[in-house]
Amino acid sequence: MSNALKRLLAQKVVLLDGSTGTMLQKYGMPAGTAPEVFCLENPGIIQRLQQEYIHAGSDILLTPTFGANRNKLKNYHLQEKTKQINTCLAEMTLNLARQHHCLVAGDIGPTGLFFQPFGEMAFEEGVGLFKEQISALSSAGVDLFIIETQIDIQEARAALLAAKEASSAPVLVSMTFDESGRTLTGTDPLTCLNILQALGADGFGLNCSTGPDKMLPVLEQLRTKAKVPLFVKPNAGLPVMENGDTVFPMSAEEFASYTALFWKLGVAMIGGCCGTTPLHMAQVAKALKGKKRKAAPDAPSRVMLSSARKSVALYARGEGPMRVIGERINPTGKPALQAELRSGKLEAVKNLAREQKEKGADILDVNVGLQGIDEKQVMMKAVSELAVFSDLPLCIDSSRPETIEAALRIYPGRALVNSLSGEEKKLAALLPVIRKYGAAFIILPLDDEGIPETFAKRKAVLRRIHAACRKAGVAWEDGLVDGLVMTVSSNPTHARLTLETVRYAAQTLGGHAVLGLSNISFGLPGREYINGAFLAMAAGEGLSAVIANPGADLLMQIKAAVDVLTGGDPNSRNYLRSMQGGGKAKAQNAAAAAGPIQERIQECILQGRKEGIESLLHDALEQHLPALEIINAIMMPAIQKAGDLYNRREYFLPQLLASAETMEKGVGMLTPHISRKERPSKGRGVIATVKGDIHDIGKKIVALLLRNHGYEIIDLGKSVDEETIIGKALEYKADFIGLSALMTTTMTEMQKVVALAKKRRIPVKIILGGAVVTQKYADEIGADGYAVDAGKSVELLNTLFASAQQDARAKEA
Amino acid sequence: MSDLVVKLIHLHTLPLKPVWTRLGYRENTEVPKVFLERIQSLLEKHVYETKVRIFYREKKYSAQNDMNDIEGYRFASSLVAKHFAPARNVLVLGASADLEDYQRLQVLQIEDIQQAVVLDAVLSEKADYALDFIEKEVQVELRRRGQHSGRRLSCGYGDFSLENQRFFYDTLDFNHYGIEINERHILYPEKTVTALLPIYHAGEGT
């Protein structure tokens, strides 16, 4: 941070200026004009406004360059003048500010583009776009930068990195959160703070979107986590309509009434955003008179990792649960994953990420080190995809500093680096990278001489790494000391050596310790028992995190138990939840496996276990149950029950479909065991979405369910005209036609089909369905029936055919 | 915003509750834990993997009685005229499922109907949610200009006829992005939505 800003912050709560855009409107800027251009063409107006802010007491003026980046200026065909526009506007502001001893902040707004991985803008291109604007403002001599109104954490990161690379001036970053309490791309305030302060922001703020009242609870949450000054720039409330005009409703007095509350929460700088005026700032200045910044309360020093969507704290000595770093994304010993990585695919990586999360991982270790691939490129691709695909923070695992740097640069979070060691070359290459990107890091107590065999030597290595960190400006507190697990079967003292290292890291150094667990049991049978016991012992020494396979059930259960015993799981909440889930699942599986074959088949259909139906039917056939009886007496009641449950909304659509698919698979398997004559058919129908309509999926579900219930279905597809439908009904000797339409403009086609069927005197029932269709409409056009959903279509046809059979019987009689 | 803005975004912030509701999940729905986890997992997979393309463009707007005029495109709708008054600009909005995702849905409808309904629900909700997303995104720019937006309206509501889809199709250059429109004014992929958003101005010289 520059000395000038430091001095100012030490003296007082700093007053920024208020809105520029809405004030320029008031001063006659026509709608649709670029404010930057308006300022250049009307220097008197912007200088008048800036004078008013100085008069109100503002200590820092912002350059009117919020939208002066290449992409925004492109809207006015001014992109080639980006440098010129920024330079002129900065100089104009500086000339005035210097006369009044004010500082000037170069104002940087969003580009209006979405950055990868959420959008399409390449990260480096975005950094370049910001650099162009920042370099111009920096050359003009601004004292600091305010990157504001950011709605996407990745764009904010790009702007901050650009500022740090293009200038030495301090950089404050301000995010905008909507009513949901998150940025537009889904990042919460604490996560934004964690990522940006680690990346080197000199201040973190909230601006725009809401009035001051909504900012108070957010500040309350941030104040104990902020290592940098906090600032606010609220709107004068949310805009409302008054007499046909848009107005910001909050008066200067009301706006300023929040000043004392902001001050109590330790806010270091206050300004105004949309709708605020020099009068608002003057009232805030009055309220701030004589107030020095309130010191923030001391917070426990915790390493916090973040993805773009959430943060995960690492706790020491039972302050919270032990964290599990999922180790499965690593090609070593996984030929399938190796093949995928070589072919440039990441499906397996994403599946491993999902599985590990489901099994309880808190952080995902990502290692793509493999002979014959471009590790850096593959790592960047994996990190990009996982940043969107998973909300778990990542641990970048590579032996190559250039791979680690590339991943940290594009990762829209705060990652953990795996790992730093005492090797001279590694220290020299990795420490500047860790510092620049503010990553947390795992420290291996080994050096160029290898892994120390004694605890004293390990301590000496750690001391050397500690000194190197201090020299490089890297916070030792952001490191997790790895206990360096070695195989106990090769040397029984290895376990004790690791535990001593964990104890030293957690208790003597007062930091965090981590273990790559599974190595301890290498070469021994029953590895899970050794691993579990060792985890419990290490937890007793103060272990914060373990690198392990979260799919190892016993280990995860021991971890849950350890959290209870160390006090990291208050009220045993997580433990109870994990035990409950396991118990229930086991009970269900046991129930499914027991009982007579009839019940098991029915359960299988009701539960939609497609993969289990074949073996059950095989067993039933072996017990000499006739195939037809299995369908009619066992399976049919089950699928009918599933339909009833769906109709009562006790099942939802995927459940009904799972049952239907299981039924279909079962019927398919049994059909060859039934003679052609005996094969059940309640009736044959053609089914289609009418001409002009392209909605298909609902009709496909209807077809599936009707087949389940013994109807033969010929699906004609979508956008089918009346001639084709009637022609096919005749060709297949259909007993009924099912028509679907989802739009009011296409449902009229149904009438044509009904009319044509009547004209040609075709003896078929016509039933209708689709979102816009009603019973009334079906009656009006002379259709035979209407079903509100797939379940009801079965009931409808059963009823229609039952009454038709009754009629036929009556005729015969 | 008078030039056409087109962005392809992940939109993984999609709230999951409406998707569950769309799939028929209600308070009294009884789902085995394993099954529930499977659907949740599928749902998350599709939310994170699919993309949506958003389109918007600002246009001048006026209305006289029931006749609306968007830079020379005139259409009758008392609903639009009544709800949009006294807006002087409108934002023409559109959102469409990425074609690749839509094609995947077509394949799944044949191969795995259960997964298809989940993806179908995600794509439908994403397209709708994308319009909310655009609204939120443009608020920053509008506030800075001392403006705010009103309630958006889509074709098919009241007397805002579906025939106006052609205007959206042309204005948002849908053709260029592989979106089609048929003789019944239905957009393909059908996971494509459009709307008009009124923009209200600050009083000049106040």
Image (spheres, rainbow, N blue to C red):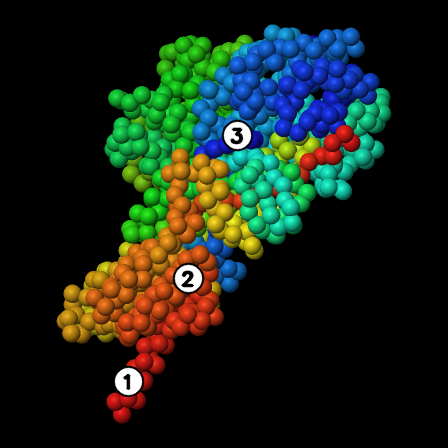
Q: Which mark is residue B3?
A: 3
Which residue is denoted by mark 1 in the rendering?
A808
Label 1 is found on which chain of the structure? Answer: A
Q: In which image quadrant can residue B138 be found?
A: top right
Please identify, in this view, whether the residue under mark 1 or under mark 2 is nearer the observer: 2
- Is A663 located above or below residue A80 in the figure? below
Q: In which image quadrant can residue A98 be found?
A: top right
User: Measured from the top left, where is residue A692 in percent x and y?
Assistant: 37, 54
User: Measured from the top left, where is residue A630 in percent x and y?
Assistant: 24, 71
- Is A524 located above or below residue A622 in the figure? above
Between disc 1 and disc 2, whose residue precedes?
A: 2
Q: Which mark is residue A129?
A: none
User: Measured from the top left, where is residue B160 in percent x and y?
Assistant: 55, 51
Label 3 is found on which chain of the structure? Answer: B
Residue A308 located left or right of residue A697: right
Which residue is denoted by mark 2 in the rendering?
A748
Q: For the residue marked with disc 3, what is the amino acid?
A: Asp
Residue at 37% across, 25% down: A379
Q: For the residue marked with disc 2, what is the amino acid?
A: Thr
State the residue in front, A270 or A601.
Answer: A270
State the residue in front, A498 or A295.
Answer: A295
